[in-house]
């Protein structure tokens, strides 16, 4: 039921994190505020393919 997704930084477009999500409950793309070690700041990370 849960699918593996990647999270990419909006600033530098690098994939820094992976997580899972339930596609039935959250059909839209998700965005989380996470720390990007390449930008060295907290930025929005949007869902991408793994």
Image (tube, helix red, strand yellow):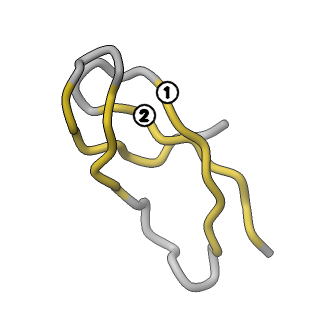
Residue 8: mark in rendering = 2
Towards the viewer: 36 or 50: 36
Residue nearest the observer in this picture, 15 or 26: 15
Viewport quadrant of the N terminus = bottom right
Residue 26 x/y as whole percent: 51, 77
Residue 36 is situated, as x and y percent measured from the top left of the image, at 33, 28
* Disc 2 residue crowd, few under 14, some 14–19, many 20+, Cα 10 Å: many
The disc, 1 or 2, on the residue closer to the chain's N-terminal end is 2
Residue 31, picture quadrant: bottom left
Disc 1 to disc 2, how far (Cα)? 4 Å
Image position of 27 (left or right of 22): left
For residue 47, side relative to residue 22 (left or right): left
Question: Viewed as shown, does residue 6 lie left or right of 35?
Answer: right
How would you rate the neighbour count of disc 1 (Cα within 10 Å): few for under 14, some for 14-19, many for 20 or more?
some
Residue at 42% x, 21% y: name it: 14
Q: Residue at x 34, y 55 (%)?
A: 32
* Mark number displayed over residue 48: none
Check residue 15 in the rendering and tell me which mark sits there, or answer none. 1
Instruction: Indicate the secondary structure of the residue bearing disc 1.
Output: strand
Q: Are marks 1 and 2 in contact (CB under 8 Å)?
A: yes
């Amino acid at each position: 039921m849960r699918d593996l997704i990647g999270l990419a930084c909006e600033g530098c477009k690098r994939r820094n994190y992976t997580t899972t999500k339930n596609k039935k409950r959250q059909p839209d793309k998700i965005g989380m505020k996470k720390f990007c070690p390449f930008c060295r700041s907290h930025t929005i990370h949007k869902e991408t393919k793994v």
